[in-house]
Image (cartoon, rainbow, N blue to C red):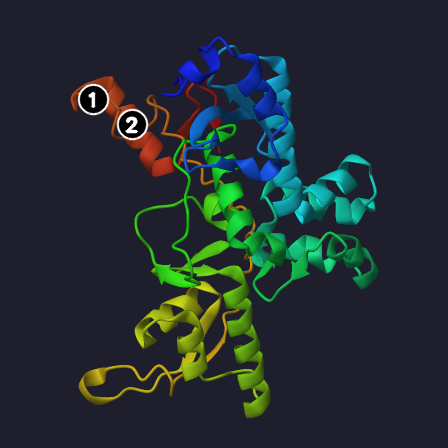
Amino acid sequence: MISDNIDTFLAPEIKKPMHELITAKDDAFSLNDKAEVLWQQTSIAKLCAGPTVLQPGLELLVEPAEEQIKQRLAAWVQMQMAERLKPLLLLRDKIDTDALDPATMVLGVRLLAALGAIDRRQIAKELKELSQEQRAGLRDCGVRFGEFSLFMPHLLRPAAARLLALLLAFGPKGNGKPFFAPPGLTSFAVDGEHLTAVLSAVGLRKCGNRLIRLDMLERVGVEIRNAKQQAGQTSFQPTLEMVALLGCSKPDLALILTSLGYQRHETVTMEADEIDELASSWVNRPPKTKTAKSAKPAVKRKPKPPNHKTSPTNQKKIDPDSPFAVLQSLKQNDGVAIAPKSRTKHV
């Protein structure tokens, strides 16, 4: 796609606009929802797939495609990433320089691949093996160890989430359709299908029939812990504060709690058998355990079919008037068996 204002760059004074572009301040550029870099309301370049999501390529949309222009715009894109995605780039640098111990490195690599946010249940095993000292290496990168997620609060800011959405959509394996959360909302109804990885990267998680910002889920986690402590039990009753935080209905809250790993412990119903969600109690759903494999049953072998020569069903009928009929009668009366091959007698 070539800019509509391409004539600006093909004018006789071509060196003047080129000089103005190259020397322009950072705030003179912007990035639209199509991942195009704008200057003076003109699309002059576009993000494209690079080696990784965090190493985007840049395609110039103007002629002549001067290398100086490309370098200036590439520097601007890197500045945007450094400012908005600082904790994620810091984690990448620590991984690249082996600044994390081996146990923390495994978790760090998974977190980087997920662009800074991952469901805690997916890494439960790795977390158990980390001491508080080892976790400090990730905390230094801005990682928060939440009740439900490991995430970077800095990346939940609108500018950071928007940039990640663009890098994902126009990076390797991107579909060119960035997902932007509605501005100002921390929880909203699901509209269509969205990949878990895309939602996680922009700081959201699908719970029931809603998409919820990760930091808001952690506030619900605090409410749950407080409710347990006040009751002095492992069970808890949902509160109106949880409903208010999530901006959802009471039935929606039940779906959200179920998706977070809880189940009803005691169900209280109202008229018409409608469940009273705020009066019912909930507990942590026990983790699924793999049942021990039972011993492999012995293979039942089919019995060999009787020898066709001795099987009564396969024996040829003997003429009762023949000499063989007499011999058959002797064998039945005396218990004598004739071997099918050797024809020797055994008493």
| 204 and 309: which is toward the camera | 204
Residue 280 picture location, percent across and down: 39, 84
Question: Which mark is first along the chain, 2 or 1?
Answer: 1
Relative to 85, is 20 above or below? above
Q: Residue drawn at (26%, 24%), measured in percent from left and top?
A: 315
Q: Is residue 194 visible?
A: yes
The three-letter amino acid code for the residue at tag 1 is Ile
Relative to 150, is 168 above or below? above
Q: Are marks 1 and 2 in contact (CB under 8 Å)?
A: yes
| 246 and 262: which is toward the camera | 246
Residue 281 picture location, percent across and down: 43, 83
The three-letter amino acid code for the residue at tag 2 is Gln
279 sits to left or right of 320: right
Q: Residue drawn at (68%, 56%), measured in percent from left and top?
A: 143
Residue reaching furthest bottom?
Answer: 231
Q: Report which residue position mark 2 lands on.
A: 328
Q: Give neighbour class at mark 1: few <14, some 14-19, many 20+ (Cα, 10 Å).
A: few
Relative to 69, is 295 above or below? below
Q: Secondary structure at mark 2?
A: helix
**Structural distance between the alpha carbons of marks 1 and 2:** 9 Å
Q: Is residue 130 visible?
A: no
Q: Report which residue position mark 1 lands on.
A: 318
